Every structure is written in C-alpha cells, then in structure tokens.
Amino acid sequence: MPLCKDAVQSLLKVSDQQGVKGYIFQPLRTHVNLVGYYSSPGSRVLLSAKFTTSEVLLITTDLLYTSSHTIWQLTQQLRPPKIPPPTEGDRHGRLAGKLSVSIVIFGHPVLEPFQVYVGSQWFAGTDDYIYITLIGSKGCSEKNLLDKPFYNDFERGAIDSYDVTVSEDIGDILLVKIEKHKYWYKDDWYCRHVTVKTPAGDYIEFPCYRWILNDKEIILREGKAKLAKDDKLQMLKQHRKKELEERQKLYRWKEWHPGFPQSIDAHCHSDLPHDIQFDSEKGVDFILNYTKAMENLFVNSFMHMFQSSWNDFADFERIFVRISNTISEYVMQHWKEDFMFGYQFLNGCNPVLIRKCHKIPDKFPVTNNMVECSLERNLTLEEEIEQGNIFIVDFELLDGISVNKTDPCTLQYIAAPICLLYKNLENKIVPIAIQLNQEPGVENPIFLPTDSHYDWLLAKIWVRSSDFHIHQTVSHLLRTHLLSEVFAIAMFRQLPAVHPVFKLLIPHVRFTIAINTKAREQLICECGLFDKANATGGGGHVELVLRSMKDLTYQSLCLPEAIKMREMESKEDIPYYFFRDDGLKVWEAVLGFVGDIVDIYYKDDKTVCEDTELQAFVKDVFVYGLRDNEALGFPKTLKTKEQLVEYLTLVVFTASGQHAAVNFGQYDWCSWIPNSPPTMRCPPPTKKDEVTIEYIIESLPDRGRSCWHLGAVWALSQFQDNELFLGFYPDEHFTEKSIKEVMVKFRKELEEIGSFIQERNKNKKLPYYYLSPDRIPNSIAV
C-alpha cells in the first residue's frame, strides 16, 4: 500500500534533492534502521527509527509498499525527531546529509495471526512476492507484503503465519485479495486456503485451492456456502458474477466428435486451465505408463511381436504375472468353467448388462430341445422363463461395427453375440446357449454346452471378447468418463466457488477433465494407443459410442432404477449379485449425505426453483453437454428438493462408485488374455465340430497385442498417487461445522459398509471388493 500521501511527497522531495535512489529497512535486535542509498556504492544517508518487527521493506522512488505486518505512516509532526529542512550542504554535498524520519504504527484493529496454507503437490511453493488485501464491509486494508526476513516463505506444504495491522475499521471481512508478482522467474503458486484470526478471537476461513499464475491476483470469499439469494451486498453479487464470467472464458464447450457428449475446449493436457491439470503430467502419460507397466510385468520383450501367435494356452502364462491368492490367478485357473463365465456377468468388471429374460427373441431361436440337458428343475424352457430363472445378454450394439484395419498385416474381427444364461439349483448363473451374430441362419449356429469342448469354449471366448468391447467403450468410457466431464464443465461454468453445490461436487470432478483430455490426446484419438490392441480401434470405438448414446438415459444412470430396469433387484432370486448389493448400499449412503447437505441450504422446493445458478448448471448439462437430446430424459430444470438430491447423487455416484465398479477390476478379470481378448484374428465359426485348439490360438491376440493389452489393464487398474477415497475431503471447501458433522456421519456409514463387505469376503475364493468405500476414489482420475 502507498504510504501517507504528504509523507510520500516529502520523502520523494528529499530523495530527489539528495540523490537518494531508495530505502531499505534493516532489522536489528531492538529497532530497524531505515537506510537511504545512493547510486554509488558505500554512499548512504542513515535514517534511524525504532520499529518492533523484524522485516525488510524496500521503498523505491517509483513505487512504495508496506510490509504485510505493519501499516506505516511517515510524518514530520507526530513524533521527534522531525525531519529537518535540508541544508545547502545536504542538497549539494550528498555525503553530509542525515535525515530522521518518524514511523508510527497504528493498531485499529490488529488481525493475528494471518495464516496461509500452501499446497503439498509438486512445485506448489513460490519465491514470488505475495501481497494481501483485506476487503471489508466498510472499506479495504492496505496492500500488505507477506514476507519474513531470513525465512523462506511459501514453501511446498508450509503453513505460514503473519501479523497484519489495519489502520482503520474496515467492518466485517468479506473478501481477501491475493496478488503475486514475479521475483526472478515464472514461479506459479498453489494456495490451499487463508485463515484470518480477528481481535475478537474468531477465525475466518477463505478457501482457495487454486494456482496463482504469473503476475495475477485472485479474490477469495469467506468459506461459508451461500446461495445467490443470500448475498445482499452489491460487492458480493459482483464477485459471483465476475468469477463466473472469467470461468466461462476458461471452460468452453467443444465438440470432439459429432454426436459425442461435448467436452472441454483443449487440444492437449497443457492447454487446460492450470487448476484442473494433473500435478505431474508424466503421471498420466498413457504411453509412458503402459510401457512402464509392461516393464513391471516383464513382458516388454514381447511387446513388438505383432503377428506372432502363441503356441497354446500355457504359452500365455509367459506374460501372466502370478500374484498369490489374487482374483487374476483364480481366473487363469478356472476361466474355462461355465460358472466362471456366468459369474462375470454379475461381479466382473462389466456387471451392468445381464437382464432377466421374459421371451426368447425371434432372432435367437433357442428351443427347449436344445437346452433341456442344462435345465435342472425338470421344467421346460418356457416354464423356467416364467419362474424367472432365465437371463440374457445381447451384444446387439456391436452388430456392423467397423473392425480395426490400422494394421494391414493382421485381419481382426468383431462379433455381436447373444447369450442365454440359467440360474441353476445352486443359484449360480451359467450359460446354456450362445449365438455369435444377430441374424439366425445355417451359418450362424447356436452353440450349446453339449457341443464339442472346443466349439463351446470358442463361443464363450467370443462372448468375453464382445463384453470387453462394450465394457471399455460404453460402460467405462461413455457412461462414466465422458458423462462426468459434462458435469464437471457445467459446474465450473455455472456455479461460483461459494455455491454449496460447487463445494459438494468439486472433490468428485478432481482430475476428470484432465484424464479425459489425455485420453483424447493419446488413447482414443486417431492412431492412438487404443488402435494398437483393440478390434474396435481405428474408428469402431467411435461408432460404438454414437450407437450407445440412445441408451444413455437419466433413469439408467440412477443405480436403483437401472437394476430394476434389468429386473435384477431381487436378492432372494439372485443372491450372489454383489455389485448390486454393495452398489445400492453406497448409493443410499451418498443419497443420505447429499440430502443432509441440501437440507441445510434449501429450505423448500421454492428455494430450488429460485436458485438461478443451480438451474443454469442443470441447463448447461442438458443443452450443451448432452446436446439438447430430449430422448435421454435428463431434466432441463429441477423443481423439488427430491429431484435435486437424486440429480446430485447421480453425479457423485457416477464419478465414484460406478467408475470404481467398472474400472479397478480390469487387471483381475482381463489380464488372462483368453478370458477377455481385446481382438480376435479369425472369424467366428460358421459350423460346428470344426474348431480345434490351433484355431482358437490363432483367433486369440498375437504376442504384441497381448502385451499392449496387459500393460493397459494393469495401468488402468492402479490408483493414483495420493488417491482420495470416498468420504474423505481434505480440501475444506465447506467451513461450516454443520457440514463437517454431516461428513463425519457419511464416513461412519461408509465404514460400516466397508466392514460388512470385508466380513462377507472372508474365506471367499472370489471376493468382491470394488465397491468397498475404502477402494472407491472420489473422482475419475484414471
């Protein structure tokens, strides 16, 4: 802050007359010397004044700042010694001049301590100059430099405290302005939050959790969440408006591909706003991670061996890493069994396709005679259907999808099978009929468990391969990654940081836009890594997303409704559907958590309707993110608290539980290549009794593609460094005690769910833990 106007003019006048270029406050034990210096070394004018802090303050003749700890006023009248009129010798001799300047410290009111919390991520600290200004209801404080002598301020992970003295009453502190000015070189700074302690002993929290770049400033609001209607002061209304205007310039919608949900306008990760980038870009480099994974798995010697087939199933073990007592090893040992095949539709990494069958489709002409040997209750197929014992999985979405032709030396194939499953007397789900394409006919036989061993085995392999394609592109990419990005962009564009919904959602979109941008840059782009090993690479995955858009309905994303739509809700009829059981528990916990927060800020339905920022968020999702597609059933507006709670629960659960369920089991279920082949190199069989072991091995991925696939599922199954799991919110965007109590309650419920899952999994050969809350990250970051 500039010094007192009259004193500044007096000081500058003396400085000009005596050739003084600047002043430095030098800290001594009992006081501070103010030293004026000339351009020539060693030529100084000494001004002595007692000062109780130990700070250095540089005052140049062009720009004067105060320290962050003291409000300074220079005057000739308040205290002796007064500044004497410069003598003729002073004016011309330069070495003879000696000035005395009084410094008065005002203390109305003193704010102590002033704490700044620096982020712990890499490069979060800074050596730049940091200034702070307090903005109150009655005025502003001076601009204060936050600096301690002989101390390295603002280091990574530090909590730095400063005393700030304000010269006059500024009223209630509403905003804090932080400014950063370059010291030597570009040195960005990540500020977690600022805490101010008032003379009355109250602590005021100002959440930041943002990067401050270059010579920029940010203005922080006090941490209590507020709806727009709660802001009465024009200053606060303007702050909300300006924040959103700035964000809307940074977070722009862009069409990555016609028909896709819209995404962020960024060509690469480095184009993103700094606040949503990964801490270390190397950490999310797919090429680097896949290569590193293949090195860790000791398969890098095979990774370039494209077109080179394996010799037999045992040969696949050469790239399979056996980890004692893991699901992946159990899969390797039992993958050929019908029980293992059926179990994966319930609790594998794509447990969202199986549905109850009420009628055998005309395109899948299975008869009672075909399957009667598989039915255990002495009932006909029709009677088993009526009793709810028959299930179906139809991969119709894959019919006609373009196959990967990026490698002219390798033909690749895709099928669109239909699989009929049966709940046997042990309540296990097993396959009883498989047709490998949609159109029935002589060259599209229905394979049965009674067929030859290799016929039936290859038919199941084809279904597993098809399930892999749907899983990666639809269940995983579209229905979690791309959808969560839509919510994230709309949130940044329409909700200010002080809005309770922003504070609720921000932990659940952490790094989501960044990981998706990296995927578009390296993974699913033309000639990306997806093309290396997957039959849907080279454009087929894009076609698959476009076809799947019609099924991306609001109702299908609400887990309880989605399970009912597939008629899989009965625990009595389907007792081993752990995805359903655990998923519903987590959904209900999230629903209660969101409901408690909504109750605090929204008194009634009218409050929801009148929240213009909330309505703008919902509209942005529908109109821009989802392209105004009425068929998807997403709301354009929210009219009740109940609707709001469900909507926000969907957003949080999609980013946390749903993604965890379909992502982190990939290595478990897909690392044994024959159980989940990413491509097939021979066409589906058109006749029975012709399949041999050699044909199956030739159909499976070659050595190079197998290794790329193995590296991919390993890398995608790993948690991020410093992963934050569901219910843990170290970034305190909410500062209210009532919300912290809600969070404690939420964590307790999640702990109970985790304990239940842990107890159930005891002694199980196939434990299901993907929806244990301690393994559910808050957001999609991988």
Image (tube, rainbow, N blue to C red):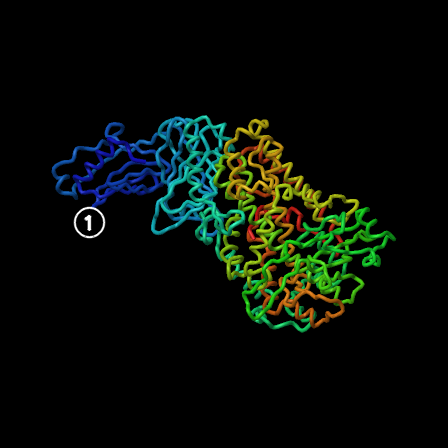
The residue at the point 35 percent across, 52 percent down is 185
Which element carries disc 1, helix, strand or loop?
loop
Establish if 643 lies above or below 371. Answer: above
Front residue of 337/193: it is 337
Front residue of 412/753: it is 412
In this picture, residue 132 sits left or right of residue 605? left
Residue behind mark 1:
40
Can I make out residue 741 in this image? no
Q: How many marks?
A: 1
Quarter holding the N terminus?
A: top left
Front residue of 401/762: it is 401
Where residue 219 appears, as percent x and y from the top left, is: 41, 37
Where residue 687 appears, as percent x and y from the top left, is: 73, 67
Q: Hey, which residue is sitting farthest front in the picture?
A: 441
Where residue 471 appears, as percent x and y from the top left, is: 63, 54
The residue at the point 68 percent across, 65 percent down is 684
* Local crowd size for mark 1, using a 10 Å CA cut-off: few (<14), some (14–19), many (≥20): few
In this picture, residue 432 sits left or right of residue 224? right
